[in-house]
Amino acid sequence: MKFLNTITVLTLSRNLAFAVFLGLALAACDSEVSNTEEDVVALTFSSQADAGASAFATNCAACHGANLEGTTLGPILSGFNFLQRWGSQTPTLLLGNIKANMPPGGAGTLTDDDYLDIVAHLLEANGVDAVVNALTASTDFVISENISSVVQRQQRAEPPAPQGVTVAGNVDDFVPFVPITDAMLENPDPADWPMHRRNYYAHSYSPLDEINTDNVGSLSLEWVWNMHEGDSEPAPLVYNGIIYLINPGNVVQALDGKSGELIWENWAGPANRQDMRNIAIYDDKIIQATTDARLIALDARTGEQVWETIVADSSKGFSNSSGPIVADGKVILGLAGCARYIPEDCYISAYDANNGELKWQFETIAEMGQPGGDTWGGLDDVFRAGGETWITGSYDPDLKLTYWGTAQQKPWVPVSRHMTIFDVGLYTNSTVAVNTDSGELDWYFQHVPAEALDLDEVFERVLVNRGDDKLVFSLGKYGILWKNDRVSGQFKGYTETVFQNAFTNINAETGEVTYRQDIQNAQLNEWTSACPSSAGGKDWHSMTYHEPSGTMIAPLSQTCLENAAREVALVQGGGGLAASRKFFEMPGTDGNLGKVGAYNVDTMEEVWSHQQRASLHTGTISTAGDLVFVGDLDRRFKALDVHTGEVLWQTRLGTAVQGHPVSFAIDGKQYIAVTSANGGTSPRTVPSVIATEIKYPSRGNAIYVFSLPE
Amino acid sequence: MKLGHKAFSLFFTTILLFTSIAQAQTETYRARLSPMPTTPQTVSTILGEGEVILTLNGNTLTVQGQFEGMSSVATMAHIHNGPPAQPGPVVYQLEIADATSGEVSASLELSDIHVEALRANELYVQIHSETNAPGELRGWIFERQ
């Protein structure tokens, strides 16, 4: 057991306070110079925890419960769940996580002492009983090793978290496995959904039409499978009747699509409750990114690990929340967690699908001396942050280009970045077209330069051919549907899908945006009110392109925010996001947070919209049966007419419908699958404080599969 | 009798015409009241909802609405001048019940500038309460569909 020694330690800030106190005392009475630290009430872990209980009640209990029991707004912070997430970590890492993320919309708003006290409260409430010393910002003991009950349990040889294959089986026992080729990915079998958006163009469209507008009213539940709990926004893959499903905590499962029977399961670790949106299949491998920025290939037949490679150093904050796309034998992956002031920047990288060998990296931040390096206001390279690629890109096999959205600069507001609205910060908040052979940038288009409200343009790029035009569409948090030529990047048009008041002008010829004056000039700690909010416009929930009707159909969100920038020191190792936020209903929407909008890709005009109180939490998919499927926070999974938006069928699931629906066929029979899930960051936080009347269980991750009755 | 019938028809037609003109001059607007900007920390203390119907006849704006479920009793209600989702200054005072639920009303003579602001969706209703002095409910005014 690693119990700490008992030397009293004061935190730095309290040392300063003590010094001031001591100085005043000395000035007041020269004869009383015998004051020592012992005369001052010494700071202890226990006193910090007492103070932390109060700070927690004020700032955290609304979401996490007064007794850390968790609510629908925030996870449980006690017992097994807390230990599973934080038991092997240190107070320093816990402190850093809380400071960076809490309270939602106001991270960093508490004092350093408040944050430290809250950490002490969490530790004490979870049984940390072997600590006397006050916590500091660098306390680095292992939390579980200072909980005597846990130590005793560990001495009884409690089994570690699962690792590797936990359920053994072989896909060949269900259906003969056929390795998947580039040609099969370029032109998927109608029965399959073999990548996150089904095809390289990211259409999220199924050519199956057995389920259609005439019979969708009879759609019935075929089977359901409970998934591991945790944050989850999954996009299942379906190949040759087998569903490959990413669960929270980096767990992949193979399920028989017909019966729902589990074939194999692999735990790649870390065994946390964190989210991974999608995986890939290529040849005979399932390829997954992990939340700690590794890339792993599993045998698609058995789930056994084939190779593993490190994408980035997770100890520096790098992570992944979305998986790869495999293009021409290369596994192409983005990167997240790039808000810190460190020498390393975010990148898109490519790996050999056969062995995981690194092929190339493309950095999304232009450094000094590089093309675009003069767009960062002269900041030293170490202070250039952001540009995450946290949503998987798309691919044009003919042009050999992969298309990705990039996130905005960090921190969120120019004044926090020590920059101005004119320091555009290439290649953030852009579409980047990268050559898949070389990793070189072919072109870029920066949709919102010098982003100022945490409204990034990082989401999926949908590739569309109209006549001779090769186009790329994207839709970011500003709710603007952008159309660009995907050969050159040239701007081709836009439409506003929800109300926005951040820009006073969008140039119809160039797409150049002009921020409202008060947003341009936003100063530290000044509130700016704007629409949409950080939940989008549109967020990670992908849109679908229904080629037969030439319409783009998007899941949209209608909320607004007030945003106030906070100061961020230019200190290596620092950085972060640094803004406080409040949220409210979007004026003129009659309180409808959710909107499915359909847009003609030629005219860019809205064809129809379906609006509802509950926010939407799945991507949209469309089918040759002229249907659109979408799910919402109020547990409803719906089928809409692709031509009118009329709701033709709906059902309610166990908890919020969240993830990416898919459609597939086995033995000629069509199925629709969708997940229910929790977590989901801003798109969940914002509706949870605006539409408080909508209730849903805080557990219930599952995949539901529907079909027509025999 | 014939003359009498014609006279009655003429009189009735005239009444209808004036009624139509009067209706044509009347514009109806609506504000949905919902909680002021909030966070997970304040969501349990900024509460309530409501609806206000506003009728414009000439420059006269008749305001009639209800609210309910606020966290504490209402103290003031105003019409503010600001485009959608951009707060602005108070331009008119409204009468409001001294309660957590009740009615809000007024009969106001708008300036020409504020009539234009109303038609441009640049006016909003805001209700203040004891525990949320800066405001607890708010709603921009739009033409009633």
Image (spheres, coloured by chain):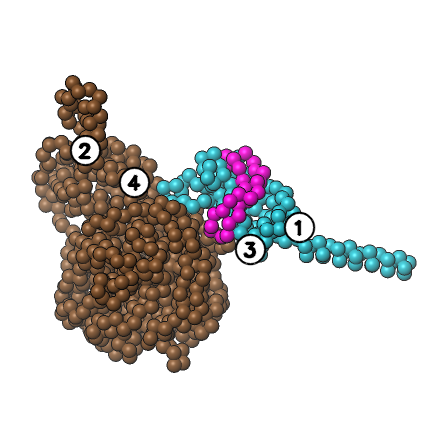
Q: Earlier in the sequence, mark 1 or mark 3?
A: 1
Q: Which residues are magenta?
A: B71-98
Tag 1 residue: B57
Q: Earlier in the sequence, mark 4 or mark 2?
A: 2
SS assignment at label 1: strand
Q: Residue at x 55, y 55 (%)?
A: B120
Marks 1/3: CA distance?
16 Å
Marks 3/2: CA distance?
57 Å
Mark in front: 1 vs 3: 3
Q: Are marks 3 and 4 on the same chain?
A: no
Q: Residue at x 33, y 76 (%)?
A: A487
Q: Is residue B90 left or right of residue A520?
A: right
Indicate the chain on which mark 4 is placed.
A
Q: Amino acid at mark 3?
A: Ala
Nearer-the-camera pick, A239 or A399: A399
| Residue B36: % across, % down | 45, 44
Around disc 4, counting alpha carbons within 10 Å, would you say few (fewer than 14), some (14 to 19), or many (20 or more)? some
Q: Is residue B86 magenta?
A: yes
The label on residue A110 is 4
- Write down the colour of chain B: cyan
Tag 2 residue: A15
